[in-house]
Amino acid sequence: MDDIAKTLSDLVSIPSVNPSGQPPTAPGHGEGGVARYVEDFLRRIGADCRRQPVLPSRANVIGFVSGRGADKLVLEAHMDTVPGENMEIEPFKPVVKDGRLYGRGACDTKASLAAMLVALRNVLRRGKPACSVVFAATVDEEHKFTGVKELLESGMRATFGV
């Protein structure tokens, strides 16, 4: 399994069901586990990290790497998923079949998180990037988009965004 697939498998294995406006008290609800994983990954590759509180017990994870130039690239993806009821497979037990990884959040949007984390790590292995990079893992996309709204309201601006 390559680095992106391994990272995606790790992320899918962590339940992060959006609690839809309720406190994330039920098992598997809220983004806390994924936030810890992303923050740990970013710190291991040398990014400065912080949590941006958004909702009770729910925070965006913001990683920052300074670059050589004045431009700034923001990489953003959300950490929450919809519930996994009525799936044909166990939602949080990744399955690889015919070269594809299946599980809750695999394509929406934990694959983006995995690809961007591994890409940033690979860029940093080559030295300081050409531009500064902000990695934003946001909460609550599946309900009211409060994570990305908070990111924008905090003044986050960039030259480029993904």
Image (tube, rainbow, N blue to C red):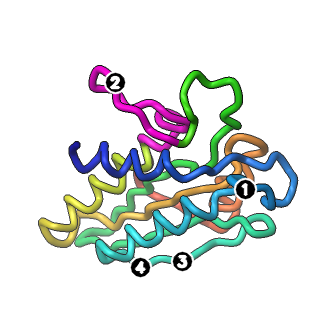
Viewer-nearest of discs 3 and 1: 1
Which label sits on residue 48?
4
**Disc 2 to disc 3, how far (Cα)?**
36 Å
Under mark 1, the amino acid is Pro
Mark 2 residue crowding within 10 angstroms, few (<14) / some (14–19) / many (20+): few
Viewer-nearest of discs 2 and 4: 2
The magenta stretch spans residue 153? no
Nearer to the camera, 83 or 153: 83
Lower sequence index among marks 2 and 3: 3
* Residue 101, image quadrant: top left
Under mark 4, the amino acid is Asp
Q: Which residue is mark 1?
A: 27
Q: Which residue is mark 2?
A: 97
Viewer-nearest of discs 2 and 3: 2
Viewer-nearest of discs 1 and 4: 1
**Disc 1 to disc 2, how far (Cα)?**
28 Å
Q: Are marks 4 and 3 in contact (CB under 8 Å)?
A: yes
Q: Are marks 3 and 1 in contact (CB under 8 Å)?
A: no
Nearer to the camera, 90 or 98: 90
Which label sits on residue 50?
3
Under mark 2, the amino acid is Lys
Mark 3 residue crowding within 10 angstroms, few (<14) / some (14–19) / many (20+): some
Lower sequence index among marks 3 and 1: 1
Lower sequence index among marks 1 and 4: 1
Determine whether 76 is above or below 151 in the image.
above
